[in-house]
Amino acid sequence: MTFRIGSTVVLPARSMARLEDLGVDLVPVESVSGLTALTNIDAAIVTITDPVGAEAVAALRAGTRLVANVGVGYNNIDVSTAAAAGITVTNTPDVLTDATADITMALLLDTTRRVTEGDQLVRSGKPWSWAFDFMWGSSLAGKRLGIVGYGRIGEAVAHRARAFGMTVASSSRRPRTEPDVEWTSLDRLFAESDVVSLHCPLTDDTRHLVDAARLRSMKKTAVLINTARGPVVDEAALVDALRAGTIGAAGLDVYEHEPLLAPGLAELANVTLTPHLGSATRETREAMADLAVRNVVALCLGADLLTPVVV
């Protein structure tokens, strides 16, 4: 039996070799609409930018048994509808933990030490010279890092932050006992942290978790870092807060209406913007694609899926 797989992902050589060894019929497409136009596919490989909603699931359901998402988040997929249709969704946890934690620290250092702002000044050709109070930033040692979402990535960020001398706080709905973490309420975390870093999934509860009221509760010198999902932050409210000095700075790798930005965001000097680079190392992206393909291979061989999403 030949398995037919539709993929919106350009797969790396190692992943392609796994499928070729099985004699799989791989059909590349550019979008979800291309996937749903295919007939008789056993599995679909998609990325976090591919919206697989209820309509797409309905179009896939005849014979399709797996949607393998190349990404740790899966808010782009209607998992409940897929499950009801007999389609399992898998994701790619663990393999992108370190890369995302690294970009978080890069944004944290950039915003607190004004690296991008300084780079732009030098490139502009405007005159400047060393002075005692020139472009002061903020040291990390002794500062409090508040982590929203203490999962694999949040824990990896905490480990890195402690190396810079930061203390770590987080919030949780259930009792937690990890050492060297101060467990506190979400309100206190935002109010008392010098840096707040977001690592929570996007759900109905976390959409616009960081709104105007939450931003007003933060220190005027505080920094907000978001490498989770854009809609966790009310981007228009963030623009107002940064412009008014309600908070000190922000570092964003994800956006509410990606790739579009809220009006005014790009003009602000106190925000660092990167184009969703959280997992963007060659090693990590190849590992993500390979894990998705290994789930497809498991399906073809009748083995247990490696990373099924539990509804």
Image (cartoon, helix red, strand yellow):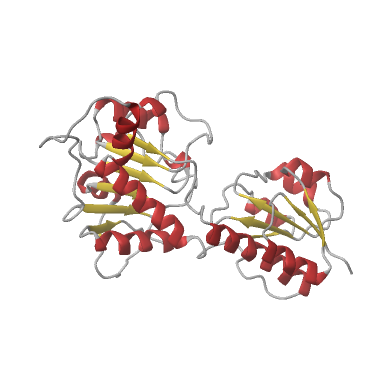
Task: Answer whether residue 120 is visible to the viewer in this image.
Answer: yes
Q: Is residue 136 left or right of residue 281?
A: left
Please report the residue visible at 35 percent of the width from the left and 46 percent of the height from the top.
Answer: 107
Q: Is residue 242 left or right of residue 277?
A: left
Left or right: residue 268 versus residue 89 is left
Q: Quadrant of residue 273?
A: top left
Q: Is residue 310 visible?
A: no
| Front in this rendered view, residue 188 or 34 | 34
Q: Nearer the viewer, residue 207 or 267?
A: 267
Q: Position of residue 55 (x, y in %)?
A: 73, 42
Q: Based on the displayed image, in which of its 4 quarters is residue 251 positioned? A: top left
Q: Indicate left or right for 182 with 273 as reference.
A: left
* Residue 47 position in % (x across, y down): 63, 50
45 above or below 252?
Answer: below
Name the residue at the left extreme: 132
Residue 114 figure quarter = top left
72 or 53: nearer the viewer: 72
Q: Residue 111: x, y in percent? A: 30, 42
Q: Count the labels in the image.
A: 0
**Residue at the right extreme, as displayed:** 1
For the N terminus, the quadrant is: bottom right
Residue depicted at 42% across the width and 60% down the height: 153
Q: Position of residue 212 (x, y in %)?
A: 33, 32
Residue under the point 45% across and 58% down: 99
Closer to the camera in the image, 256 or 84: 256
- In the rendered image, the quadrant that contains the C terminus is bottom right
